[in-house]
Image (cartoon, helix red, strand yellow):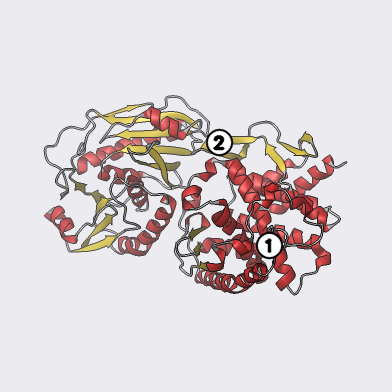
Amino acid sequence: MAYIIIKHPIHSSITDQECLLAIPDQYKIGDPIFTEVKPAEIDLGDGSDEWEQLALVQKKHFFETVKPVLEKYSDSPIFYFGFAPIPLIVHLASLIDNWRKVFPMFRTHNTHEWKFSLDNKKPVNYTITGLPQDENLSSNDISLNVGISFSVNPTQTQAVVGNSLMKSILVETDEPGYDQIYDQEDLIEFGNQVEHIFRTVLEKFPNLDVVHFFASIPIPAAFVFGHKIQPNIYPVIQTYQYKATDEKRYTPAIKINQRQEEKVEFSPAQITLAKKYRKSWNTMLTGEVQRFIDNLKKTNHKNWHDYLESGNAMASFKVPYWGYLEPLAANQLLYQDKISQKTDPIADGFSYDQAVYEWSIDTSFFIALSKRLKEDPLIHKAGRLFLFHETLHYSFHGINSQVAAGIGSFPKVIEESDYQADVYALLHEYAYAKLYDNSFNKGNFKEWFLQTIHIMTETMWSFDDQGVAIKEIQIRRMNRYIMWYWQAVKIKYANTLKDVMDILSEKPVIEFSGLNIKASNQRVFYNLDRMAENHCEMAIYANGKVTRTTPPNYLQLIEGFKERNGEKVKNVLEMFYKTISR
């Protein structure tokens, strides 16, 4: 026999002795098994700009250190000692099977002692307002505001969620304050209240996508809330971190119960594959790419595009919109960069540590990229395109980790900078191929650009490829795909290299509409399963005119996005191109 102790010391250390003193003697049957989950150290009152990354690291720690112990001692009681931000507590609790008996321990507010239950117990009465009475088939979001330690202001939380909010549910105790929940029985009752709320919500709102969880609650209650979350039954739970000194007060933190967040098991072969590409990309970056930059430094040109192609082909790039960009030879980062060989999971697929000039890339990205491109030369070409693109963001555009946080709320800004970085990468890869690719044939320029745009879009899909059909996509993300498939169609019908350069120099103004729109956390998404109208339309502004029509095969475009199939999307756009070119 044994009893399991899970320590979660994010705000400060928790000693083994403190834990042992707090556990009642009747539970000390056998030996204590100590485990710890510590994805980071965060000062009390501080938040984080990297919640999803913290969630990934925490999940990794849990499955490596805690999960094996829970499986080995499946009948042993569990005692949770946590001093951490609420989003991390809820997330960790959600990872533990909700049939397991867990005793969340109390940390007194004044003396900071750990206890199984608090003294001077009083009755805890809950008031719940806003529970839905009628059925609603909308997929809009709701907020769940739980105020036990302090009241939660629903006006503030509504402003945070925005227009996608269709309902606010408020849970309060009679007298909010510290230490309002006293013992394990109170925690059981709080868990019953949580289950009652979600039963009602799921019954009345069967299509609900997201519950925004705003909480001012004790640590044990936060653990109980997370432990009650039922995977694949409850909707997505968006947690928030509260900071009184911030203007917005509530910052979006960790999303829990996302369908794609199910634990991914990589096979030994897949892990080996990712290691292979981390190593080969690093060799390419520190060798071939640096030699390319050295070669560019030897040229004497005023603008970055002058050394990419001679003659009149680049005439359309001689405008301020393109002229502002820095030459790759002046880039302060890429020449010093390296690829991390660590295998830690990375939120959003990759990260860049500018302090040490290091790129970290997730295993899942390499697996998806290998599945989509298959051949090593194409995968290495994807690596150069990725690095040329991202280094412009970091070195010139100024999109560092601070600016990038929440930049998805500015879709037009990121759309412009992404298109510039895409073209910048594409043209530098063209210059690279002329110098170092033995198979390069300048006469086949059109085929080269079409193949390279294919590699670019397949690389983009690799970040979206979770192995399952896509149900929703951020509108700015869809626009980026549509723009590049449109450019590929136009280049297919181009005649000269100058025609290709003219096409690339002008960012397309093209949009698809008719799908149901959803807003979440200041971002706007298309629901690929639901149409807002009885048909969809495509519109484009080109040559001084606006053209708007319903492509006869527009359903194929929707299917293409669901299946991450670029050829289907491109086929729709080619038919649209032929229609407006008549």
Measured as percent of width and height from the top left, residue 182 is found at 18, 40
SS assignment at label 2: strand
Q: Residue furthest right?
A: 582
**Above or below for 554 versus 125:** below
In space, the residues marked 2 and 1 are separated at their CA atoms by: 37 Å
User: Which kind of residue does numbered mark 1 sit on?
Assistant: His
Q: Residue at x 52, y 30 (%)?
A: 137
Question: Pointer 1: what residue?
Answer: 428
**Above or below for 328 versus 186:** below
Residue 492 visible in this rendered orientation of the protein: no
Q: Residue at x 28, y 60 (%)?
A: 36
Q: Residue at x 49, y 44 (%)?
A: 406
Q: Nearer the viewer, residue 292 or 111?
A: 292
Residue 535 is drawn in which quadrant? Answer: top right
User: Which kind of residue does numbered mark 2 sit on?
Assistant: Lys
**Above or below for 70 versus 91:** below
Q: Residue at x 30, y 52 (%)?
A: 100
Measured as percent of width and height from the top left, residue 12 is found at 24, 54
Question: Pointer 2: what residue?
Answer: 518
**Mark closer to the observer (2, 1):** 1
Whether residue 479 sits left or right of residue 578 in the image: it is: left
The numbered mark, 2 or 1, whose residue comes first in the sequence reads: 1
Q: Which dot marks residue 213? A: none
Measured as percent of width and height from the top left, residue 5 is found at 24, 58
Q: Split into 4 quadrants, where in the image is the C terminus?
A: top right
Q: Split into 4 quadrants, where in the image is the N terminus?
A: bottom left
Q: Residues within 10 Å of mark 1 (few under 14, many from 20)?
A: many
Q: Nearer the viewer, residue 97 or 524?
A: 524
**Above or below for 371 versus 486:** below
Residue 47 visible in this rendered orientation of the protein: yes
